[in-house]
Image: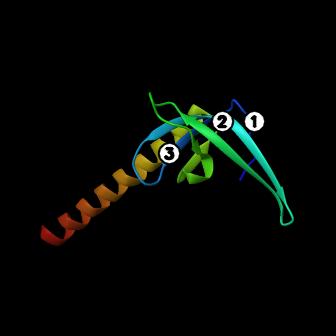
Amino acid sequence: MSKYEVGTILWIIHKDRPGLVAYRIIEEITKKTLEGEKIQYIVQPAIPKAKPVQLESIKGRIFLSAEEAKNALVENASKAIDAIVEKTQNLINRVF
């Protein structure tokens, strides 16, 4: 996991459901054990009344700017559209 600063906004494209959610890092927890040091982040989603969660519990791609997240979303949408067109073209070739 990357090192983040408290207050940083993370733009996350969720894997388990479509969509983009912004989270703000509200807490950094450093735990030192005999096995080494582990850093955990607590993040607050930009959703009204949502509770803070551990960053590691979120399954998705993390971006540090809206522009990076937008580019990834456009790329994902473009791939999905390409797949639809290819599937339709294959049907045309088979049926017609």
Q: Disc 2 and disc 3: Cα gap in Å?
A: 16 Å
Secondary element at tag 2? strand
Residue 2 coordinates in the image, percent (x, y): 73, 49
Relative to 35, say whether 74 is above or below: above
Cβ atoms under marks 1 and 2 closer than 8 Å: yes
Query: Which amino acid does the dot numbered 2 rest on?
Result: Ile
Residue 25 lies left or right of residue 72; in this view the side is: right
The first of marks 2 and 3 along the sequence is 3
Element assignment for label 3: strand
The CA span between labels 1 and 3 is 20 Å
Residue type at tag 1: Glu
Disc 1, SS: loop
The circle on residue 5 is 1
Nearer to me, 93 or 4 = 4
Where is mark 3, residue-wise?
Answer: 13
Give whichever of discs 1 and 3 has the lower sequence position: 1
Residue at position x 34%, y 59% in the image:
83
Question: Where residue 64 sits: x, y (%)?
Answer: 65, 37
Q: Give the numbered dot on residue 36.
A: none
* Position of residue 86 in the picture relative to residue 91 (left or right): right
User: Which residue reaches farthest left?
Assistant: 96
Q: Is residue 44 shown left or right of residue 86?
A: right
Quarter in which the C terminus is drawn: bottom left
Tell me where residue 34 appears, x and y as whole percent: 87, 65
Pointers 2 and 3 in contact (C-beta within 8 Å): no
Q: What x and y, as percent, mark residue 18?
A: 39, 47
Residue 25: mark: 2
Give the distance between the C-alpha atoms of the residues marked 1 and 2, in whole angstroms. 7 Å
